[in-house]
């Protein structure tokens, strides 16, 4: 299953941004049933962590906070199955396409979302989703219904379902998954 298919199927991406003991967190999330994990490149240990997480074989691994084309090269070399950015950077999307790796650039406004989608994004990351909430997702998707959105930033167990009900194909959750029990609850809720 491709990274995009798995994101759409699981509807949840766990985001690990500068966390202590990344390997233990990946293991705990996998044990809780999380199947897609994003490790952000703003952590100095990210590339090694991506390689080790990919080597597990039980999780799909994304490289996050990819802001420059050369970061795509490093992420792909480490085994990232897709690259995620906080903003739309055309050079990142183009470089990912050269490697045959999906790019998920970030956007907030309808203009940014449309630009990212037209440039070949596999999904568009609506960031920060908490700014406009589920209603904003619904409003944006009214004219942009063909654009699959991964909503991140301000998503937690209390609002994840509302974002999906508003039309997002998946949500990205970070610190709200620090507690393994919370991760299990969220995974169970999203699989209903």
Image: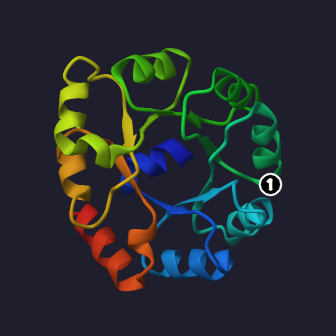
Image quarter (top left, top right, bottom left or bottom right) of the C terminus: bottom left
Is any part of residue 191 visible from this angle? no
Structural crowding at the residue carrying mark 1, measured as other residues with C-alpha within 10 Å and reported as few (<14), some (14–19) or many (≥20): some
Tell whether 40 sits left or right of 167.
right
At numbered mark 1, what does the secondary structure look like: helix, strand or loop? helix
Q: How far across and down, in percent of the image, does residue 117 sit?
A: 47, 21
Question: What colour scheme was applied to this rendering of the protein?
Answer: rainbow
Residue at image coords 25%, 40%: 132
Q: Which residue is mark 1?
A: 78
Q: How far across and down, in percent of the image, does residue 138 sit?
A: 18, 33
Q: How far across and down, in percent of the image, does residue 20 sit?
A: 64, 79
Q: How far across and down, in percent of the image, does residue 101 sit?
A: 67, 36
Residue at image coords 70%, 63%: 54
Residue at image coords 70%, 31%: 96
Q: Give 174 or 164, whichever is nearer the viewer.
A: 174
Is any part of residue 55 visible from this angle? yes
Q: Quadrant of residue 155?
A: bottom left
Q: How many marks?
A: 1
Residue 124, placed above or below residue 129: above
Tell whether 121 sits left or right of 75.
left
Residue with the most extreme front position: 131
Residue 123, placed above or below residue 118: below
Tell whether 191 sits left or right of 69.
left
Q: Quadrant of residue 108?
A: top left
Residue at image coords 42%, 41%: 127
Q: Quadrant of residue 59?
A: bottom right
């Amino acid at each position: 299953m491709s990274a995009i298919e798995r994101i759409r199927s699981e509807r949840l991406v766990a985001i690990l941004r500068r966390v202590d003991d990344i390997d233990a967190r990946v293991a705990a999330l996998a044990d809780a049933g999380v199947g897609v994990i994003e490790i952000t490149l703003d952590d100095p240990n990210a590339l090694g962590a991506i390689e080790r997480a990919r080597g597990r074989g039980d999780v799909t691994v994304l490289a996050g906070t990819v802001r420059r084309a050369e970061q795509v090269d490093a992420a792909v070399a480490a085994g990232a199955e897709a690259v995620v950015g906080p903003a739309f950077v055309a050079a990142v999307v183009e470089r990912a396409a050269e490697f045959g790796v999906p790019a998920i650039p970030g956007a907030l406004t309808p203009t940014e979302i449309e630009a990212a989608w037209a440039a070949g994004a596999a999904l568009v990351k609506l960031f920060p989703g908490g700014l406009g909430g589920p209603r904003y997702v619904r409003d944006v998707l009214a004219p942009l219904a063909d654009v699959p959105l991964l909503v991140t930033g301000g998503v937690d167990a209390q609002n994840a379902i509302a974002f999906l009900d508003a039309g997002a194909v998946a949500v990205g959750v970070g610190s709200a998954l620090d507690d393994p029990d919370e991760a299990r609850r969220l995974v169970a809720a999203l699989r209903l």
